[in-house]
Amino acid sequence: MKYYLYHLGTWPELSFVAENEQGRVVGYVLGKINDDDPSAAAGAAPGKAPVEGHITSLSVLRSYRRLGLAERLMAQAQRAMVEAYGAESVSLHVRVSNKAAFSLYKNNLKFDVKFTDAKYYADGEDAYAMTKPLADLYPAKVESLDF
């Protein structure tokens, strides 16, 4: 529970839920902004590293899958990352054994595998570290509303 409260308290604008007609939560996405040392980014001036969002958790109840909910939740989180923080990219990790999730991220959501993170999970399983640029998907700000 602490995990969810931490995300909701720190980055409330980056978490979303999907509800069914009865108001039951059937899916959610938790996002955050990577808060690693900005000076550690390759080629970045101290304090000027590109802002990167991160999806820490995405889940949709099995009976509500293949309806586009995951894509909608991800789109909302990614857009919020750009609008609220100016994120230029988003990252996530997925278990190597999770073929369905990998297919969703790679084929539907257009994430690319950056590298394989050995023994990423507590049980020792490897994870694909995946990224997606956001700069061209959502404008960070509106320059003008002139018609």
Image: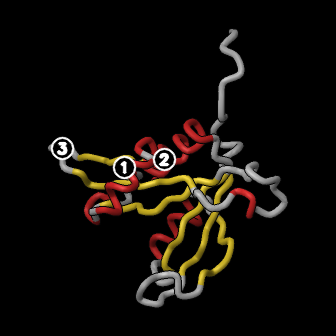
Q: CA distance from mark 2 to mark 3?
A: 20 Å
> In the image shown, does 124 or 97 lie closer to the viewer?
124
Residue identifier under label 3: 23
Mark 1, residues whose alpha carbon is within 10 Å: few (<14), some, or many (≥20)? some
Q: Residue at x 60, y 56 (%)?
A: 90
User: Hey, what amino acid is under mark 1?
Assistant: Leu
Q: Is residue 31 left or right of residue 22?
A: right
Foreground disc of the pair 2, 1? 1
Q: Residue at x 55, y 65 (%)?
A: 92
* x, y percent for residue 11: 45, 47
- Quarter assignment of residue 70: bottom left
User: Mark 1: which secondary structure?
Assistant: helix
- Quarter assignment of residue 27: bottom left
User: Hey, what amino acid is under mark 3?
Assistant: Gly
User: Hey, what amino acid is under mark 2?
Assistant: Ala
Residue identifier under label 1: 8
User: Mark 2: which secondary structure?
Assistant: helix
Mark 2–mark 1 CB contact (< 8 Å): no
Mark 1–mark 3 CB contact (< 8 Å): no
Q: CA distance from mark 2 to mark 1?
A: 13 Å
Residue identifier under label 2: 77
- Disc on the earlier residue, 1 or 3: 1
